[in-house]
Image (spheres, rainbow, N blue to C red):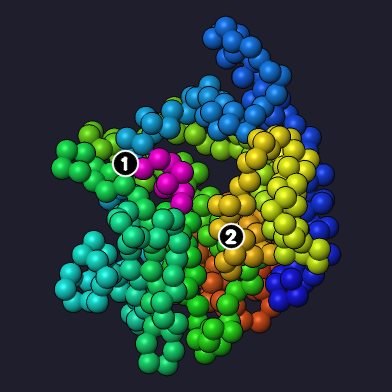
Amino acid sequence: CTKRMSGSFQAVDEFLTNLQTKLEAAGKDDYETLLQLKKDHCKDMGIDFDGKLNAWDTGYYGNELLKSKGVDSEKIREYFPLDHVVSTTMEIYQELLGLTFTELLQGTYWSWHKEVRCFHVKDTASDNSIGHFYLDLHPRDGKYGHAAIFHLVKHNSTHGAVDCMLCNLPASTEGKPSLLRHQNVVTFFHEFGHIMHGLCSEGIGNSTRLAKCPRDFVEAPSQMLENWCWQKSILERLSKHYQTGEKLPDAMLNNMIQAKHVNVAFGSLRQIYLSRLDLEIHGPHPPKTAEELQSLVDKLRPAITLVENPPGNNMLRTFGHLMNQYSASYYGYMWAEVLSADMFATRFEKEGVMNPKVGMDYRKLVLAPGGTHNITDHLTKFLGRPPSNEAFLKSRRILK
């Protein structure tokens, strides 16, 4: 932790402990809400109610809760055709950050597959070249199975940076375009934010591998940009019904926005659980056998998430973050969410989500420094004060 924003294990431990304490009451309320839905459902179906939420219940009743608030995920998909979402997302980023993207013609650039697209990025004001990015959006045999960004080339004195976004979004068919769930829209917006972080870094210092951002900050810029996918004016731009061309109706749009924080405390407790698992396994006294690993999961899951671990179930078998660059750093997702909430609420929410001045401040004061110098100093310049957790706590219903 000494090379991260947190500075020490003690700071991370205190952060997670304090956050869990503050989330427990709201998380318990979320749990009880889902439990009541299950009770009512069991009564309607004439089946026994076991008085608890099982691990396999949470997703189903979470979706039922959204439906009760007027959020129909399948209906909403009809308003997010992939091609429109991709082109509009890029328009928004260009306007916000003062950039110009130009797609290169097929055959004029090196590529590993015919579906891969490549774009040249320039600074709009100066027309100076910044770099290039690839988009590889659709699944195929042998391809990496998740959404991720790969920084292929760092900029130096002779060329700009080259980044790549890999996704596995459904491809269009002859009879119907690819339609995205709103969560897929958020994911695309998030990952594209990583592309901008890589391309907008400036200075000789950022041309070296030593200038990587601290792992507990690297998610913050993209998490902050997810907020655009919950703004009415932006959703109106991003949405376009695949048959009629209409924007999201106000009723559907308003229901989505109002339901943004449904179950958010419950979900945050799960993130704390995963963070604790990660830290225990990479700590000074890690489990040494499969039985000890199983015992750790069985103990921590109900203690933090309120949901028992099914007998013999061990999500560590598929928890890829444990053995990649996020090892001993999974807490960074929550740490970064505190920073991202502060950046959005303090500048963009107050001064306008498409305010070009704020966008350029963000580009120059947060993205451009990359991994050089002290991240807290960069954020302090952008915010006009040291970072605070107030906005994050409000978003989690901990503060009014």
At a point 21% along the width and 65% down the height, the residue shown is 114
Above or below residue 324? Residue 315 is above
Q: Which mark is residue 321?
A: 2
- State which quadrant residue 30 falls in: top right
- State which quadrant residue 29 falls in: top right
Q: Residues within 10 Å of mark 1 (few under 14, many from 20)?
A: many
> Mark 2 belongs to which amino acid?
His
**Residue 365: percent from the left, percent from the top?**
58, 73
Nearest the eye: 307 or 375: 307
At a point 59% along the width and 84% down the height, the residue shown is 210
Q: Which mark is residue 338?
A: none
**Residue 255: percent from the left, percent from the top?**
50, 30
Task: Check disc 2 and report its element: helix, strand or loop.
Answer: helix
Nearest the eye: 157 or 99: 157
**Residue 251: percent from the left, percent from the top?**
44, 27
**Residue 268: percent from the left, percent from the top?**
67, 44
Image quarter of the C terminus? top right
Question: Tag 1 or tag 2, which sits nearer the N-term?
Answer: 1
The answer to whether 92 appears left or right of 56 in the picture is left
> Mark 1 belongs to which amino acid?
Leu
Q: Residues within 10 Å of mark 2 (few under 14, many from 20)?
A: some
Identify the residue position indicated by label 1 in the image.
179
Q: Is residue 218 visible?
A: no
Image quarter of the N terminus? bottom right
Magenta stretch containing residue 186, yes or no? yes
Span highlighted in magenta in the image: 179-187
- State which quadrant residue 333 falls in: bottom right
Above or below residue 186? Residue 113 is below
Magenta stretch containing residue 269, yes or no? no
